[in-house]
Image: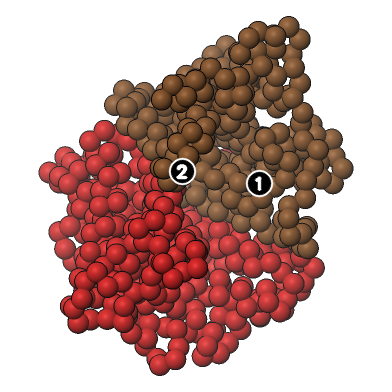
Amino acid sequence: MSEAFDILFTVSFWVAAIRIASPLIFATMGELICERAGVLNLGIEGIMVAGAFTGWFTVYMGGDLWTGVLVAALTGAAFGFLHGFLTVPLGLSQHVTGIGITLLASSLTYFTYRILLPEVTSPPKIEPFQPLPVLVLSDIPVLGPALFNQTPLTYLAYLSVAAVAFVLYRTPVGVAVRAVGENPAAVEAQGISVTAVRMGAVMAGSALMAVGGAFLTMSAFNSFFFEMINGRGWIAIALVVFGSWRPGKALLGAILFAAFDAYQVRLQQITGGVIPSQIFLMMPFVLSIVALVVVARRASYPKALMTPYQKGER
Amino acid sequence: MRLEPRASASPAATLLWPAGAIVATLLISSLLVMLAGASPLTVFWLVFKGAAGSQFALLETLTRATPLIFTGLAVAVAFRARLWNIGAEAQLYLGAVMTVVLGTGAVAMPSAGLIPLIMIAAMLTGALALLGPAVLKTRFGVDEVVTTLLLNFIVLLFVSMLLEGPLKDPMGLGWPQSQRVIADAQLPRLIKGKRLHFGFVLALASAIVVWVIMKKTVLGYEMRAVGHNAEAARFAGIPVNRVIVKTALLSGGLAALAGFSEVAGLKGNLTLDLSPGYGYTGIVVAMLAMLNPLGVVAAAIFVAGIFVGADAMSRSANVPSYIAQVMVATSLLTMVAAIMLMRYRVRWR
């Protein structure tokens, strides 16, 4: 029993937790921006697949790692544009369109993978991002190596939370984004185009999701394989609700969740096969549902979430 | 730009927009086929031939359409009441689990009794699987999209656990697969020596039953009312939550039948690759059918044809069979857009 407890005090556990949290942070921030603007983006799972592939492939073709991140972000923005175009000006069902985007983005990715790399049996590898200790900060015991001896992409994930929080709460753009998610008619009355703000938010959010996918192929691992996103997008959607649409709380949720995930892997090793491994693998998903039930009652979701806006209506 | 509802969709619009959606889908997939270095016309011809070019191809398409009719109906029923069941995949697998639990010799009775028993048990399992998310929605306000999506992963892990544990076939050489169902639990083949099985007939019958429920019963009326405007329905005295729960039971039960029919009719046992995403494809089928139960049959056969045809095509032309998934996803997006444009007029201003 004490063994199970000791895990919590090992450095490697916290390092793993932050590593697992990183793609979730990107994805959760991305979904959060979309939903704050009133657009549910169920395309997230597929957009992460696409970003994971295009980022990795750019590097595989000889591109710079940061060019890869940029390409992933642009891929995400492109799918975001499609989702935005169908759900914002056309006002199609955000549920159905989102699922459609996920199906399209992932199948398009697999199709492209097969065309570009027809003969490969084992996925080719790239030289991924390496851990980059931050001076002084990484010397803090336990927390230092966990938080500040990660790859640059993890630092970018921290930065994305700060940026999203800053833009949402401290800039006119952020006010507009939050307002189109709460009361679009009022925004239109101010002479701001609801369509433009929502489209922009969905594209920016989708770009972040794609970078989250790219984290897996370019930082956590070094190759692209099928099914690698494995529900992380859906978990990000749950984390947005859990964080009640606030960047800080969502970040906390992502880290808690990742810590739990890192913990179950280690617990699995201690229990030594007495409990089927599937039980442990299920726990993150079960935990997400439990978290949703706990917060659902007092969730204050954006009022205009999932409501298409038509100029001049009402 | 803005959208104005049309008073009534003109016959030309009802024909032209969906036709436009099909053309757009074909154009986009042509582009991809050309990227793969093949000629679109040849590839489409091969897909068509692979799906409908021979008796074998046609029967194969209908066989593949069978689970899609069930999951398509499950989604159509749920979406009609605006219950966003994205968990047909999970319900399908649970139906299959129940089929294996009862069908591998645990219950011995003649097939006239055994098959209906298994069918009902499978439906109940699937229904219960969606009851959870439905109650979480009505009681706690938890979004069912996320819960049903997450449940897909939980159930698949659960099935994997069963297949490595209590349901594992001791003669399976270590593979994670169940024992085969006994002869009395098997659905008969429709044509001797061919793969098309009685599950297809059940699927057609289900489509008719669902159509009757939707169009001719009070429950169907209530479901449509709730889906159209839950607030108004509540105001009109319709017990909205109870209707949602009933919808969930029906939808989950239908999806479970897909699992039952695949195991008892086609595969004979349960493996982890029983469904290549039939639950998710059911969403496409339902949307292409505009949520009409009878339309689901046609849409399922169409989608199955693309899959079967693309498989055959990829064996002879050098184009990955993933083109089928791309075509299906594209047709979903273009079709929902077309349906919108059919009902609304775009004003550029």
Q: Is residue A310 above or below residue A19?
A: below
In depth, the one of A308 and B150 nearer the eye is B150
Q: Amino acid at mark 1?
A: Ala
Chain letter of the residue beneath label 2 in the structure image: A
Asked if residue A126 lies left or right of residue A211, the reply is: right
Residue at point 57%, 20% (across, down): A10
Residue at point 25%, 48% (across, down): B131
- Could you tell me residue B191's position as x and y percent? 40, 91
Report which colour depicts chain A.
brown
Which chain is tinted red?
Answer: B
Q: Quadrant of residue B97?
A: bottom left
* Mark 1 or mark 2, earlier in chain: 1
- Could you tell me residue A126's position as x and y percent? 79, 42
The residue carrying mark 2 is A273
Q: Is residue B26 above or below residue A143?
A: below
Closer to us: mark 1 or mark 2? 2
Element marked by disc 1: helix
Q: Residue furthest left?
A: B237
On residue B187, which mark appears?
Answer: none
Residue at point 18%, 66% (across, down): B216
The N terminus of chain A, quarter of image: top left
Asked if residue A186 lies left or right of residue B23, the reply is: left
Element marked by disc 2: loop
On residue A50, which mark appears?
Answer: 1
In depth, the one of B90 and A121 nearer the eye is A121
Is residue A276 at least partly visible in the picture?
A: yes
